[in-house]
Image (cartoon, rainbow, N blue to C red):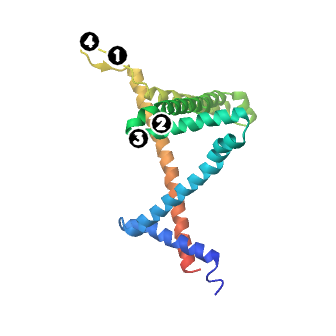
Amino acid sequence: MSDFISSEFISAAIAFLLTISILSYLFGDNALFRSAVHIFVGVSAGYVAAVVWNQVLAPQLFRPIFEGAPNEKINASIVLFLAFLLMMKAIPPLSKFGTPSVAIMVGVGAAVAIGGAVTGTLFPQMMATINVFDLQAANERGVSSGIQFVEGGLMLFGTISTLVYFQFSAKRGDDGKTRHNPLIKLLVLIGKVFIAITFGVLFAGVFSAALTAFIERLDFLITFIAP
């Protein structure tokens, strides 16, 4: 009896019921599915709130105000004041007071996004493309120089054509219509092919991961029903 009502069995039973509730969406939207979604959203919101409080608000805002050095109290007070102004956006007559906070958030967010894209994507992509043409390193790895050069050329060509795809400038002809350079049109077409291949690979990866999770859930259901 103790084994029957053990914590492991209760956890497995809850997981079983939630899995059945989610899979019930195969038969259309229903109360079981909505209940499972509400539970998921509620638990996720609670978890996020706990993480925000324990890792952001308490250690980086309230603790410095009450226990920090004078400069930490000043910095935390400024942040708290900006947060208070941001909450004014929820009150229409006072929403204009939250504009400075929104401007700071958007500016910092844009700077972080651009900096991350440049240092985390653009520069590494450039270096990877350059390093592919290092034939000496390829020979040291036992790779033929010709194969390495072809791979490097394909990577460089794919990078350039993909970047050209996002180039939207065009010249206006005598008849008033915009016309792209034929070479640019060809590169754009090739860039579309590379982008399509990339999205296809990403979709295949996502689908494979989802299928793996689905098979794991089915295996769990079968194991729970007939251990």
- Residue 190 percent across, percent down from the top left: 44, 31
Q: Say which amino acid is labelled 2.
A: Phe
- 19 or 48: which is nearer to us? 48
Q: Say which amino acid is labelled 3.
A: Ile
Question: How many residues crowd mark 1 within 10 Å: few (<14), some (14–19), many (20+)?
Answer: few
Q: Which of the two labelled residues, at mark 3 and mark 1, occupies the earlier sequence position?
A: 3
Marks 3 and 4: CB-CB under 8 Å? no
Image depth: mark 3 or mark 1 in front:
3
Image depth: mark 2 or mark 4 in front:
4
Q: Which residue is mark 2?
A: 194
Q: Picture quarter containing residue 187?
A: top left
Q: Residue at x 47, y 36 (%)?
A: 194
Q: Which of the two labelled residues, at mark 3 and mark 4, occupies the earlier sequence position?
A: 3
Q: Which residue is mark 4?
A: 174
Q: Which residue is mark 3?
A: 91
- Answer yes or no: is residue 176 visible: yes
Residue 96's place in the image compared with 198, above or below, is: above
Image depth: mark 2 or mark 3 in front:
3
Question: How many residues crowd mark 2 within 10 Å: few (<14), some (14–19), many (20+)?
Answer: some
Identify the element where label 2 is drawn. Answer: helix
- 34 or 58: which is nearer to us? 58
Identify the element where label 4 is drawn. Answer: loop
Q: Is residue 9 left or right of residue 38?
A: right
- 40 or 114: which is nearer to us? 40
Q: CA distance from mark 3 to mark 4?
A: 54 Å
Q: Which residue is mark 1?
A: 171
Q: Picture quarter containing residue 129?
A: top right
Q: CA distance from mark 2 to mark 3?
A: 48 Å
Q: CA distance from mark 2 to mark 1?
A: 25 Å
Q: Say which amino acid is labelled 1.
A: Lys
Q: Which of the two labelled residues, at mark 2 and mark 4, occupies the earlier sequence position?
A: 4
Image depth: mark 3 or mark 4 in front:
3
